[in-house]
Image: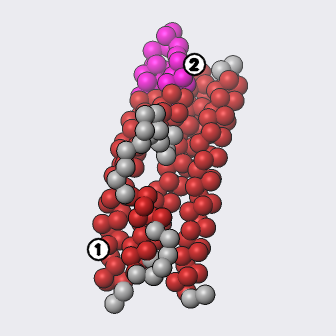
């Protein structure tokens, strides 16, 4: 095998591992959040608010990092391997081809609806109208996570195109 063949094989393997990890981490985070939220419910109000929210935030950031890495590797493969004229599978180019999913088939690679719903559920579970200072902290923390998830989802939708342009611009300088 040539170095290019080894690189292609290893990067495809990396995509598979990270993609699987992302699919496991999203639901596992929600399960851990539920356990922490229920156990924190009986403790200190500050813990009740922040600990479950930290679990959600950490899990979301892990999912996001895995997804970004997979997409970047995919665009790299598309430009530096599929675009070289070698007879390789054209998976990455096919993945970017314009298509419209059928009704109800739009995917959320960052589990955006799941994390948003969990954040809203956490807000409801930690609501304490008798503690106005905690309510302000509670609202700001939950709103910050919801905004973060929404902005990351938006950026995720534009990532393939921007990464592709980035690698296409780099290609001539790296192949000299």
Start-end of magenta stretch:
119-140
- The quadrant of the rendering that contains the N terminus is bottom right
Which residue lies under the disc numbered 1? 169
Q: How is the image coloured?
A: secondary structure
Q: Nearer the viewer, residue 142 or 69?
A: 69
Q: Main secondary structure of the magenta part?
A: helix
As for residue 54 lying within the magenta part, the answer is no
Residue that numbered label 2 is attached to: 125
Q: Quick check: can you spot residue 137? A: no
Instruction: Please report the residue visible at 47 percent of the width from the left and 42 percent of the height from the top.
Output: 107
Based on the displayed image, in which of its 4 quarters is residue 169 positioned?
bottom left
What residue is rendered at 55% in x and 49% in y? 62
Q: Which is closer to the viewer, label 2 or label 1? A: 1
Label count reads 2
- Horizontal and vertical percent position of residue 97: 37, 57
Residue 95 in the image: above or below residue 26: below
């Amino acid at each position: 095998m040539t170095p290019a063949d080894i690189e292609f094989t290893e990067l495809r393997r990396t995509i598979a591992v990270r993609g699987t990890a992302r699919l496991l981490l999203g639901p596992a985070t929600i399960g851990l959040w539920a356990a922490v939220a229920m156990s924190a419910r009986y403790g200190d109000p500050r813990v009740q608010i922040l600990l479950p929210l930290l679990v959600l935030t950490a899990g979301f950031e892990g999912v996001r990092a895995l997804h970004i890495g997979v997409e970047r590797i995919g665009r790299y493969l598309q430009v530096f391997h599929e675009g070289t004229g070698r007879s390789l599978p054209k998976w990455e180019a096919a993945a970017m081809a314009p298509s419209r999913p059928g009704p109800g088939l739009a995917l959320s690679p960052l589990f955006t609806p799941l994390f948003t719903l969990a954040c809203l559920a956490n807000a409801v579970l930690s609501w304490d109208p008798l503690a106005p200072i905690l309510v302000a902290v509670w609202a700001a923390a939950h709103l910050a996570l919801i905004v973060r998830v929404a902005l990351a989802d938006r950026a995720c939708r534009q990532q393939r195109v921007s990464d592709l342009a980035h690698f296409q611009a780099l290609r001539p300088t790296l192949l000299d």
